[in-house]
Amino acid sequence: MRKRYATAACWLLLIPYVGLLWVPFYNFHDPVLFGFPFFYWYQLAWVPITAVLTWIAYRSMRHDD
Amino acid sequence: MTTEIDPTALAVFIFFFLLVTVMGFVAARWRVPKTLAHIDEWGLGGRSFGTWITWFLVGGDFYTAYTVIAVPALVYTVGAYGFFALPYTIVVYPFVFMVMPVLWQKAKDFGYVTAGDVVYGQYGSRGLELAVAITGVIATMPYIALQLVGMTAVLKALGLHGEVPLAIAFIVLALYTYSAGLRAPALIAFVKDIMIYIAVIAAVAVIPIKLGGYENVFNAAQADFTAKGAGSLLLGGNQYVAYATLALGSALAAFMYPHTLTGIFASNSGKTIRKNAVLLPAYTLLLGLLALLGYMGHAAHLTLSSPNDVVPALFQTLFPSWFAGFAFAAVAIGALVPAAVMSIGAANLFTRNFWKAYVNPKVDPAGEAKVAKVTSLAVKVGALLVIVFLPTQFALDLQLLGGIWILQTLPALVFGLFMNWFRAPGLLAGWFVGFFGGTYLVWSNGLKPLQAISLGGAPFTVYIGLLALAANIIVAVVVNAAMPKQVAAA
């Protein structure tokens, strides 16, 4: 059961690949946030999002070492 | 940009440079083992680095001085397209999280020091081992040379022209790496990263205020791009695929390099590596903000002799000279840490997969450490000679090819961790096709890493590294499937 949960959490790690490698999602100027065009703040926002997803995957794993 | 010597800036610079030099030599006594005369100790710091040291070490050799100079320079010149470094350094971590702890475990269990060791252990093929080891060494050499390009940019801004200051910095680096091994860059990385963080955070906070806010920064860049007729704040329609494939290909290649692998193998556990995959993106955030210094260069109306001067010129123009000296020291030290780890990674490869394999199979660990120390000196001298005697463009072109080359070692290094199906002849054939096919494509495109492809509709450009990797994998699968097992085993 624990193992299945861990595997599911690892699938979360595919999300950043979709969000960042599919350029049509974010190649826009608007909306602007704090002066940053969307293209820039969208990609910067994926830094903390990816870190959180990786952290969830980390928490779900058994660490034998 | 002024190139007169500024005494304050130079004094601050020299102070920090001396500080890390002392630290480099003291490092031999840091977390000291019974003996440094063992390649595990000299070349991997005894495989004992915990979460924090690994974070500083991997961060320090992955985000290099060349990055600090070149990413903003590229963004300054071409705009959005240069920003691919950001998605690249994000998607690299899920890959590190899934793959590198498995690789670490294998290296730990069998005492592997290099990628070549892992491949030889898995497939028992000297040919494949040699292919992986040679690829690692020749991909790393120009990378070290580029660190010197980064250092030259700040030395020039300090008013230090010519090759002598560069050579002095490098000889100092070579000596403490020789005596302390991986412990030297690991210890210096603390100072380097804290300095880089201070410099960059100050830059991204203070410069936009002086230049009228981020909105103004982006507008100024847009105005310059429009006036110039080149570059843009957004990607053009034909750049989508190039942007995404460059990001993905670079991410897959990043941890195939000997220096990043050295950082991985030096960790004390797989858990440490996973934790670092969570924590290392903090550097990526910094890199993203740093890239925007390219646009700030437009807003500050700098006149530059080369785009590589954009970061030094910004510091020089907008900050007091003591802080500029501090920032330049951060960049120069930022060149030393990765250059040291790179030369150690290349030296480990030479020692384990060439010297031990062909010259002296009976060499003991102390002998290995000795060969590796001497090789690390030779590697650094080689990189210095490249920069002094060959045009910078040569190192840049080689570095670009190096990324494509190192990516071709991925199937041999990674696939065996998760499945037992592949055998050496298929992987070697795949490597051969990927390596030489990729090189040929880059060559025939005038040393550009992109290949135009047309599938009926509008043509688009793809990163050649990824194309070559696809060819590599297809050939490996076909040869492996076609070859009877008995023949391969014989």
Image (cartoon, coloured by chain):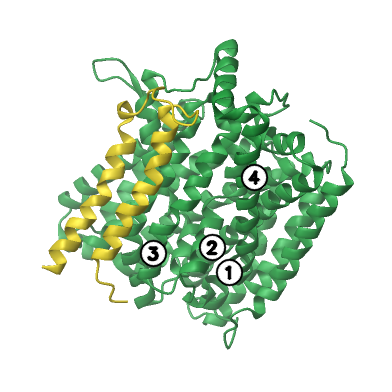
Amino acid type shown at disc 1: Leu
Distance from Cα at disc 4 to Cα at disc 1: 30 Å
Q: Nearer the viewer, residue A2 or B410?
A: A2
Image mark 3: chain: B
Bin the neighbour count of mark 1 within 10 Å (Cα to Cα): few under 14, some 14-19, many 20 and up.
Answer: many
Nearest to the eye among marks 4 and 2: give it.
4
On the image, the x and y values in percent for residue B208 come to 62, 33
Disc 3 secondary structure class: helix
Pointer 3 residue: B275
Q: Earlier in the sequence, mark 4 or mark 1?
A: 1
Check the picture and name the quadrant holding the C terminus of chain B: bottom left
Pointer 4 residue: B202
Q: Nearer the viewer, residue B395 or B79?
A: B79
Mark 1 touching mark 2, by CB under 8 A?
yes
Residue B81, visible in the rendered structure = yes
Image mark 4: chain: B
On the image, the x and y values in percent for residue B405 come to 44, 45
**B308 displayed left or right of A1:** right
Q: Earlier in the sequence, mark 3 or mark 1?
A: 1
Instruction: Name the quadrant containing residue B347.
Output: bottom right
Nearest to the eye among marks 3 and 4: give it.
4
Image mark 1: chain: B
